[in-house]
Image (tube, grey):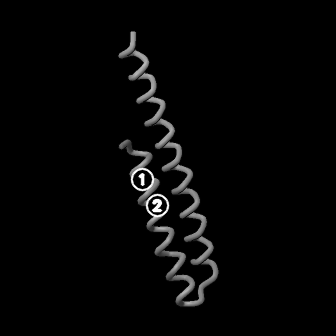
Amino acid sequence: MNKDQVAGRVDQAKGKVKEVAGRVVGNESLEAEGAAEKVAGKVQSTYGDVKEKTKDAIKDGANKL
């Protein structure tokens, strides 16, 4: 697991908390901020997943030589 995967998942969780809190208290801007943070976290964690898979594929290819 790399730092992008971890940071992305943390941001997703923080975004979910903000989104729910905004919905509960009726604060639309907090809800929207949370939704945006969730999406940004998803993008970052997906980027981390791709990096990890690429690194593993390169490592596997090098081991076959």
- Residue 9, placed above or below residue 3: below
Instruction: Using residue 28 as the reference point, say whether residue 63 is left or right of it.
Output: left
Disc 2 designates what residue? 11
Q: Residues within 10 Å of mark 2 (few under 14, many from 20)?
A: many
What numbered label is drawn on residue 38? none
User: On the rendered image, what quadrant is the C terminus found in?
Assistant: top left
Horizontal and vertical percent for residue 54?
48, 30
Give the amino acid at mark 2: Asp
Disc 1 designates what residue? 7
C-beta proximity under 8 Å, tags 2 and 1: yes
**Between residues 58 and 35, which one lies in front from this camera angle?**
58
SS class, disc 1:
helix
- Residue 55, placed above or below residue 35: above
Q: Quadrant of residue 62?
A: top left
Horizontal and vertical percent for residue 24?
53, 88
Give the amino acid at mark 1: Ala
> What residue sits 36% from the left and 16% below the top?
63
User: On the rendered image, what quadrant is the N terminus found in?
Assistant: top left
Instruction: Using residue 60 as the reference point, say whether residue 20 is left or right of it.
Output: right
Horizontal and vertical percent for residue 33?
59, 70
